[in-house]
Structures are given as structure tokens and as C-alpha cells.
Image (cartoon, grey):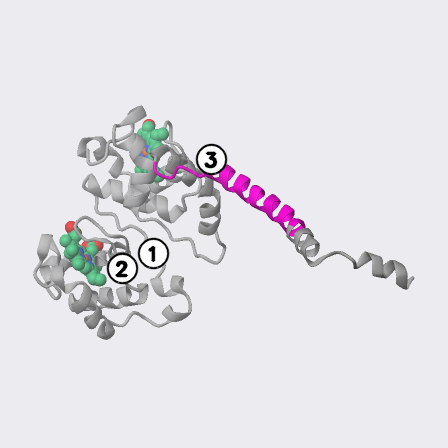
């Protein structure tokens, strides 16, 4: 036994080194070649993110995920404003007057219909009437959203219907917002974010306390004003142009403007 062991260890130091190096080199070479192969394949398949078509394709791929995120049950559904609903759903018929739809802002088209009253118009818009499909064909719209779109359209044709208001932002925003919007806290937010336009009346921005400029707006109530300040309306950019402004701060600033103009929270 001792004899055969002695034989096996008789390799010279050179032989040992050569066999060790050779033994290491073969797998290393294999690994190197595999890595080269993988890198080569990746190069060929690298997505082309520059072209328009490629970006569209990518958006299409991630869309289902994005939509799922949007449907997260924990996010309360934010009801659209009348204008948003109109722009998304109703305009396709009511702007061109397709199928005999009364055209937007065309008083002649709407005159006879307005006489039916807001409630009947809402009922017809929700249930559909003749060529007018129920909810404009978008079954996802809530009654409130349809009612707002009807007010938006009817008011553009001369009516003065009062659209249903949003649930108070406090209720929607959860824990932090269980408190009422605070006009006193809103003054500082206003000074920092809103005064640039509202103090001077830039582009027709109503000045704080200017009763004449606010009187027609107050009818929308605090919630309606908040909605418009949140989403933007005409010359008023969404959140005054500061997308990072927390909703609670915005609510306080709107409350400040609302109460300065004589509104009661
Ligand atoms: C597919 C086309 C189409 C779309 C989309 C559409 N409408 Fe209409 N709408 C019509 C037509 C056509 C009429 C006229 C029906 C009639 O009186 O014969 C009409 C009439 C109306 C009327 C008047 C009803 C009455 O009693 O006189 C209201 C209000 C209305 N639409 C609201 C809406 C709202 C709100 C939306 C979006 C949510 C919408 N429509 C989307 C085609 C459409
Ligand atoms: C870039 C200029 C600008 C800034 C900044 C700005 N606003 Fe306005 N805002 C306007 C204009 C212009 C109007 C009038 C829009 C109209 O009715 O045509 C307006 C209207 C409003 C209204 C009335 C909306 C309605 O429904 O009548 C409210 C409320 C309001 N702004 C709140 C705010 C608050 C709160 C801030 C700050 C967080 C702010 N705005 C910042 C330009 C601005």
C-alpha cells in the first residue's frame, strides 16, 4: 500500500504546475466563451428605445401593469370634472354634432332641450335617448360624472345648472385630511404658490377678497373650487403649476381664497 502511494506522488513540481494550470484553464475558457455568447445575444436584442414606434410598443407593454396600479383598491376613485368627462367621452359626438347631437356651445341646438330641466337632461344622458347612448357609451362613468358633464355642456349653452360637488377632499384624502381645510394655514401656502398670479390678477386670476371677481365662482362651493384648483381650469394651472404641492396645502390655500371672498366653509 505504502508503495503505490509513493508512486502516485512522484510527479515533478513542473508537472504539478502544468496540470493545475491546464485543469483551471479549460473551465475558464469555457466560461469566457459563454459570457461572450450571452453578451453578443444581448447586444442584438437590446431594445431600441429611441424610435417613436419602440416607445409606443414599450408603453403598450407596461400599460396593463400601469392600469392595475391605477385600479388599486386602496386608491379612492377620483371623479372627473364635467369638462374632463366631456373632453374624454362626449366631445366625439357633441363637438361635431354627430348623429344630430346638440353641438357644444350652440345655443340654438340646446335651447329647446334646456327647458326640460337639469334632472331630465341628466336622466336622458344616464339612460340614453334615441341616438344618444347611455352615459355617452362609457359605462364606467358615475352618475355624478355624467351629471357634471351635462352641467358643463348645458352651462356652455347658456344654462346655469349647479353640478354636483365632489366629496369634500378631506373625506377622500383619508387620515391627514380628516381636519377641515384651514384658511389661516392657507395664507402662507397662498403667498408662496398662488400670489404670483392671484395678487396681481395675471391672466384674469381673481384677486383675494375681490368680491366681484369671486361672486360667480363662489356658487361652485368650496369643493367645486378645490376641484378646479386641483385639476386646473382655463388660465388656472393644476395646483397653481406646482405639482408637488400637497393636497392638504392646496385645500388650505383654496379655503383661504374662498373665505376671503366671503364664502362659508
Ligand atoms: C355616440 C354619440 C354621442 C356621445 C358619445 C354622447 N352623446 Fe349626448 N347626444 C347624442 C345625440 C345623437 C343626442 C340627441 C338625441 C336626440 O334628442 O335625438 C344627444 C343628446 C344629449 C343630451 C340632450 C338630451 C335631451 O334630453 O335633450 C344630453 C344632455 C347629452 N347628450 C349628454 C351627453 C353626455 C353628458 C355625454 C358624455 C358623457 C354624451 N352626451 C355623449 C349623441 C352622443
Ligand atoms: C399661473 C398663474 C396662477 C397661479 C400660480 C395660480 N392661479 Fe389660480 N387662477 C389663475 C387664473 C388665470 C384663474 C382664473 C381662471 C378662469 O376662471 O378663467 C384662476 C382661478 C382660480 C380659482 C377659481 C377657480 C374657479 O373655479 O373659478 C381658484 C380657487 C384658484 N385659482 C386657486 C389657486 C390656488 C389655491 C393657487 C395656488 C396653489 C393658484 N390658484 C395659483 C391663475 C393662477
- Is residue 40 found inside the magenta-colored segment of the image? yes
Whether residue 43 is situated above or below residue 74 in the rendered picture:
above
Residue topped by disc 3:
44
Q: Which residue is at 10% across, 52% downward?
A: 203
Q: Position of residue 204 (x, y in %)?
A: 10, 53
Q: Quadrant of residue 241?
A: bottom left
How packed mark 3 is, by other alpha carbons closer than 10 Å (few <14, some 14-19, many 20 or more), is: few
Judged left or right of residue 199, residue 151 is right
Does the residue at mark 1 contact the one at mark 3 (Cβ under 8 Å)?
no
Q: Quadrant of the N terminus?
A: bottom right
Q: Which mark is residue 166?
A: 1
Pair 1/3: label in front: 3
Kindly give the residue lying farthest to the left in the view shown.
Answer: 200
Q: Quadrant of the C terminus?
A: bottom left
Disc 2 within 8 angstroms of ligand 2 (CB) = yes
Q: Nearer the viewer, residue 245 or 199?
A: 245
Where, by quadrant of the figure, is residue 202 drawn? bottom left
Q: Residues within 10 Å of mark 2 (few under 14, many from 20)?
A: many
Q: Where's residue 229, x and y in %?
A: 24, 57
Earlier-in-chain disc, 1 versus 3: 3
Q: 68 or 79, which is in the foreground?
A: 68
Question: Which element type, helix, strand or loop, lies under badge 2?
Answer: helix
Main SS, magenta residues: helix
Amino acid at each position: 500500500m505504502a508503495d503505490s502511494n509513493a508512486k502516485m506522488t512522484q510527479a515533478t513540481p513542473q508537472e504539478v504546475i502544468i496540470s493545475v494550470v491546464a485543469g483551471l484553464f479549460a473551465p475558464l475558457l469555457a466560461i469566457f466563451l459563454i459570457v461572450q455568447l450571452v453578451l453578443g445575444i444581448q447586444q442584438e436584442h437590446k431594445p431600441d428605445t429611441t424610435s417613436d414606434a419602440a416607445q409606443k410598443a414599450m408603453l403598450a407593454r407596461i400599460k396593463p401593469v400601469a392600469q392595475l396600479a391605477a385600479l388599486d383598491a386602496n386608491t379612492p376613485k377620483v371623479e372627473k370634472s364635467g369638462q374632463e368627462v366631456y373632453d374624454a367621452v362626449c366631445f366625439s359626438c357633441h363637438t361635431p354634432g354627430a348623429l344630430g347631437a346638440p353641438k357644444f356651445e350652440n345655443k340654438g341646438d340646446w335651447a329647446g332641450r334646456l327647458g326640460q330641466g337639469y334632472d331630465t337632461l341628466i336622466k336622458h344622458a344616464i339612460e340614453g335617448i334615441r341616438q344618444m347612448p347611455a352615459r355617452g357609451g362609457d359605462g364606467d362613468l358615475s352618475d355624478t360624472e355624467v351629471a357634471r358633464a351635462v352641467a358643463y355642456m348645458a352651462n356652455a349653452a347658456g344654462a346655469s345648472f349647479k353640478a354636483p360637488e365632489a366629496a369634500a377632499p378631506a373625506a377622500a384624502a383619508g387620515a391627514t385630511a380628516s381636519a377641515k381645510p384651514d384658511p389661516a394655514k392657507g395664507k402662507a401656502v397662498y403667498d408662496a404658490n398662488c400670489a404670483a398670479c392671484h395678487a396681481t390678477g395675471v391672466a384674469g386670476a381673481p384677486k383675494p377678497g375681490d368680491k366681484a371677481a369671486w361672486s360667480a365662482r363662489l356658487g361652485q362651493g368650496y369643493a367645486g373650487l378645490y376641484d378646479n384648483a386641483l385639476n386646473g381650469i382655463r388660465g388656472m394651472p393644476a395646483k397653481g403649476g406646482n405639482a408637488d404641492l400637497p393636497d392638504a396645502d392646496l385645500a388650505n390655500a383654496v379655503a383661504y381664497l374662498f373665505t376671503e371672498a366671503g364664502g362659508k366653509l
